[in-house]
């Protein structure tokens, strides 16, 4: 809520400036916007750490203990892999920066560039999700886990892309459902405000509506992020079984044991 309020207030203040005559200049709006952006970055970093860690630890514990999950084991798994997680997130941050640079270049290519952007986005998401699962399922180091995540992704590229497409569509539907109510309220308010010549940049009610609407969007993003990692956790064990046949071999070894 704090981040949403600062971003909305700062953006509305910047948008209300008249740069032709230097009117409406207010340094506080820039400070609000910068502070909101910094808090938003910290929120995204912390929630990514929490979402990826807890979702991956939950799925790994669920599989290892055949559906019997205990919170103590999840916390222990996270704390024991905390250093590996932080290092990987820092590496992931550099990869994301490179992704944005490549995306900007691809944006100049009509249609094919858009398809390449989506494919690259799904690929990176899969690599991050599968690498996190590799860390928690087998306690691998950053290099080993990242290598396995990249290997699973490249060897099952089209399956990964289609899986990411389906998950992306489902997350988009959830996000639209969550923000539909504040979006309708914002649309109605903006329409009647324009008709009544109300200045949105100075309206307290408009600031509150936009703040709650943007906060709802952030919450939906955090929620869908956790759901996505759970989905990639299930995909990890599916791909792991296809490659190594561990579950099948375990069932074969049990044949005749009880006889």
Image (cartoon, rainbow, N blue to C red):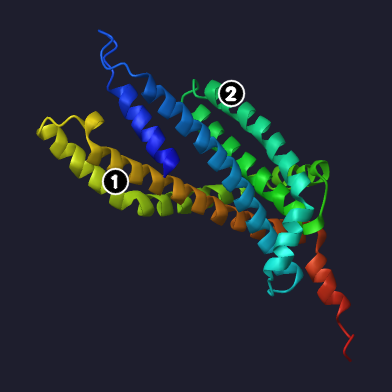
- Considering only vertical position in the picture, is 161 above or below 237? above
Q: Decide which of 176, 167 is in the foreground and name it.
A: 176
Percent x, y for residue 109? 50, 22
Q: Decide which of 201, 158 is in the foreground and name it.
A: 201
Q: Residues within 10 Å of mark 1 (few under 14, many from 20)?
A: some
The quadrant of the picture occupied by the N terminus is top left
Judged left or right of residue 89, residue 215 is left
Residue drawn at 56 percent across, 32 percent down: 116
Percent x, y for residue 130? 69, 50
Q: Residue furthest left?
A: 196
- Considering only vertical position in the picture, is 203 above or below 257? above
- Considering only vertical position in the picture, is 8 above or below 51? above
Q: Secondary structure at mark 1?
A: helix
Judged left or right of residue 156, residue 44 is left
Residue drawn at 64 percent across, 27 percent down: 98
Whole-angstrom CA distance, mark 1 to mark 2, is 31 Å
Q: Which of the two discs, 1 and 2, sits closer to the camera?
A: 1
Q: Residue furthest bottom?
A: 259
Q: Which mark is residue 101?
A: 2
- The residue under label 1 is 183
Percent x, y for residue 214? 38, 42
């Amino acid at each position: 809520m704090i981040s949403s309020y600062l971003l909305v207030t700062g953006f509305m203040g910047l948008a209300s400036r008249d740069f032709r005559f230097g009117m409406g200049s207010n340094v506080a709006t820039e400070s609000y916007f910068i502070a909101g952006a910094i808090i938003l970055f910290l929120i995204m970093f912390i929630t990514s750490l929490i979402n990826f860690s807890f979702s991956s630890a939950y799925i790994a514990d669920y599989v290892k203990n055949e559906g019997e999950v205990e919170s103590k084991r999840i916390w222990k798994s996270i704390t024991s892999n905390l250093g590996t997680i932080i290092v990987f997130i820092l590496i992931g941050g550099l990869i994301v920066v490179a992704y944005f640079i490549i995306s900007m270049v691809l944006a100049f290519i009509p249609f094919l560039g858009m398809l390449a952007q989506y494919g690259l986005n799904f690929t990176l998401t899969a690599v991050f999700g599968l690498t996190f699962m590799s860390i928690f399922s087998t306690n691998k180091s950053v290099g080993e886990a990242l290598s396995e995540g990249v290997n699973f992704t490249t060897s099952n590229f089209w399956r990964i892309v289609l899986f990411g497409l389906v998950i992306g569509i489902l997350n988009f539907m959830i996000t639209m459902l969550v923000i539909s109510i504040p979006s309708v309220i914002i649309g109605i308010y903006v329409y009647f405000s324009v008709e009544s010549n109300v200045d949105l940049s100075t309206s307290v009610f408009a600031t509150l509506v936009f703040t709650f609407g943007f906060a709802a969007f952030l919450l939906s993003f955090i929620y869908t992020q956790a759901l996505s990692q759970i989905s990639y956790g299930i995909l990890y064990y599916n791909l792991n079984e296809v490659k190594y046949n561990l579950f099948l071999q375990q069932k074969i070894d049990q044949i005749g044991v009880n006889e």
